[in-house]
Amino acid sequence: MDPLILARLQFALTTVYHFFFVPLTLGLSVLVAVMETIYVRTGNETYKRMTKFWGKLFLINFAMGVVTGIVQEFQFGMNWSEYSRFVGDIFGAPLAIEATLAFFLESTFLGVWIFGWDRLSKGLHATVFWLVAIGSNISALWILIANSFMQQPVGFEPAAGGGVVMTDFFALLGNPNVWLMFPHTLFSGFATAAFFIMGISAYHLLRKNEPEVFRRSFQLAAIVGVIATFLVALNGHAQAQHMVQIQPMKMATAEALWESEDPASFSLITIGDMKNRKDVFAIRLPRMLSLLSYNRLDGEVKGINNLQAEYEATYGPGNYVPPAIIPYWTFRLMVGSGFAMIAISLFALFFMVRGGKYEKYARVLKWLPYGMALPYLANSTGWILTEVGRYPWVVFGLVKLEDGVSPFSIVTPAMLWISLIGYVVIYSVLIVATIYLMRKFAKAGPAATDVAPKAGKA
Amino acid sequence: MDLNSLWFILIAVLYIGFFVLEGFDFGVGMLLPFLGKNDNERRAVINTIGPHWDGNEVWLLTAGGATFAAFPHWYATLFSGFYLPLFLLLMGLILRGVAFEFRSKDDNPTWRAAWDWAIFIGSALPALLLGVAFANIVRGLPINADMQYTGGFFYLLNWYGLLGGVTAVVTFLLHGAIFLSMKTTANVMERAQLAAKRIFPVAAVITLAMLISTYLATDLIERLGINPGIVPLAAMVAFLLAGYFTFRKMNGWAFTMTAVNIAFTMVTVFIILFPRVMISTTDPAFSLTIYNASSSQYTLTVMTIVALIFVPIVLVYQGWSYWVFRKRVEAKPEQLTY
């Protein structure tokens, strides 16, 4: 197999796996902090039990996010050393700042929180968890500042000896792409946490288990869910419009738009012939893509063939077309899951407003635990779209994949195989353990987290 | 002093912080299967580092990030060159981190025993690999004119590198045993003290061997003469004092001394290197230095401002976290969290 494919596959695998755990950390950290704050303010023991119950599930998830995140910090140098040399002057800074500002904060204070229930005052203990939540969310900001440079490079100039150097740190921070991606990621995190809480709460409500805890949890999650899913969608729309401007090829492949159109049509479904770049079968809604791109019924959206020609003229010969099937379908899965989530959140809110009579709505509520899969699908496909759609660039317009990967004479194909297989094996084992623990504690409910872990038998 | 030198020092500080802090929790992890004779005792051992191990590990991540930001070529050459050792290091750290969190969340003895061994392997393997890596870094590596490491995996397993790995393992075992003597009670404390006494003579022999080998295997004499200056001597003195205090059961002092020993050993490593960051044995001219491997002055300036503001804040709150958990940990289930 082409070693470049191996290196890319490994990055994709480790990153998607890492991001499986991150959004829940982002959203749930804030929601647990809110629960603990309500407990401190009101003295209501139900909120303490909620904090402990959701906090336990948070910890299981957080551990996986942390350990898979270590790989992320290392693999730019390990697998993408030439990329690291080329953009290190710019890309290293946000990573180092992320570690200094965010990793220390979340890791140190999470340790204090876990072990500090009896050692800190109530108010201080809740404050400590807010610091964890802030640390996690700041971490997302800095890594997105780094990623946004790859999507839309700003604040740099070519260096004398090759590569690029930073000329304006604040341009990196103010990169318009950051301020579209960061909210999108945050709201997705809240939506993920909301669906997580709603799914597990619905499971218990239907079994009449601890209705007080789970009614309040469900309430909080339903409100957060509606707000977050709407904001993700609105923000996603703005992001798509930005994408048409900065990376039109990503939109063209996500829409299977072979030739430029004005007004441009939106693909409802396309089965394409990628080799010859034409439709085999397609249903398209006229003018809709122009509407989505520009908020009006006309306006040119560039097509794959036109962009390929344009890029060849600018950057020289080569293939500038991402494997369209991936952006096309991930885009649809992401948006589809997003709309399903909006609908489910609205139902959840309606159900709460109508008094939360779970017997009456049991037939619908019993599906909510399965709804927990939707944000995971949307989060993963969203990132795959973002990253695969940038093909063939590591940094758009500056570094191509083959120029960024570590030299195959140094990191040999054998090494790539070893590490790829190693990650697959260890991640598979760990996901089994994680799901086992998550199910166990989620099903057991707050009774299991009211007490410390049981003594072992040995 | 220029910014390049400042960042060299800052990265040295990050590695020192990492080895002093994670050093004892690696040691605790390696000692876990041997010092805890029943589940409560093993939990007590884990709980001594429970609140801290994750914060300690961030020192390594920050060192990696800072290397990337300040010396991208160092980061690129080192991380791609040491591909397999770093991959194994990651596997160890992944296992270990999850193990701490998952271990006591189920009471099945097989489950717990499996995670205990994961903690053992996840502590021993990174300690060994980091020792091998740093020994090879001071010894020098085949690096070509394009700043690429050309030695392959097995080149790293030379006698000096392996001795470095063993030195790291015994140093952290001693550091961890003394830490446990300080932080536990009753049977566990006694076993930890006994372990420290038994490890010390072994560590003494290996450390001496490492010291002599360093004269032979590196360009230390060439650059600094037979008298290496006060820092390595201070490291040796601290090491001997650690032994003295261990036998006198003055655990707090012994711990301070192993910490000083580790810190001064790492300072020595960075003194031997300076101003190089990766020594080329192919041709000294191919070595990476703090100048040819660095970021631009602009980036270094930005990073300096960030570091000067935030590193002191980190030190304060991480110090506070140790203060919060200053008490000894008893092997009583009602007092244990993990």
Image (spheres, rainbow, N blue to C red):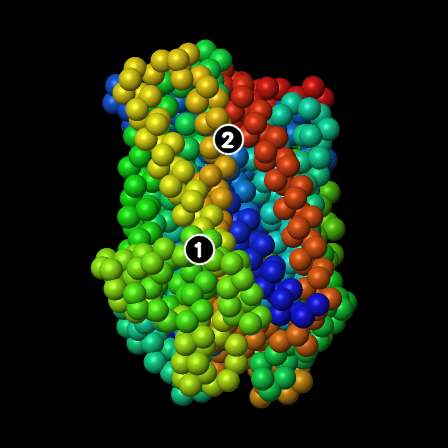
Q: Secondary structure at mark 2?
A: helix
Question: Which chain letter goes with mark 2?
Answer: A
Q: Residue at x 71, y 59 (%)?
A: A418
B131 or A284, which is in the foreground? A284
Between A264 and B338, the residue placed more toward the observer is A264
Q: Quadrant of the N terminus of chain B?
A: bottom left
Q: Which mark is residue A370?
A: 2
Foreground: B337 or A12?
Answer: A12
Q: Which numbered marker is on residue A283?
A: 1
Horizontal and vertical percent position of residue B338: 55, 29
Q: Is residue A451 left or right of residue B84?
A: left
Q: Amino acid at mark 2?
A: Tyr
The answer to whether B238 is drawn above or below residue B195 in the figure is: below
Point 68% across, 64% down: residue: A416
Q: Position of residue A297 (x, y in %)?
A: 24, 60
Q: Quadrant of residue A354?
A: top left
Which amino acid type is shown beneath numbered disc 1?
Ile
- Mark 2 burial class by Cα count in 10 Å: few <14, some 14-19, many 20+: few
Q: Is A345 left or right of B174, judged from the image as shown?
A: left
B39 up-or-down from A242: above or below: above
Q: Nearer the viewer, mark 2 or mark 1?
A: 1
| Marks 2 and 1, how far apart at CA | 30 Å
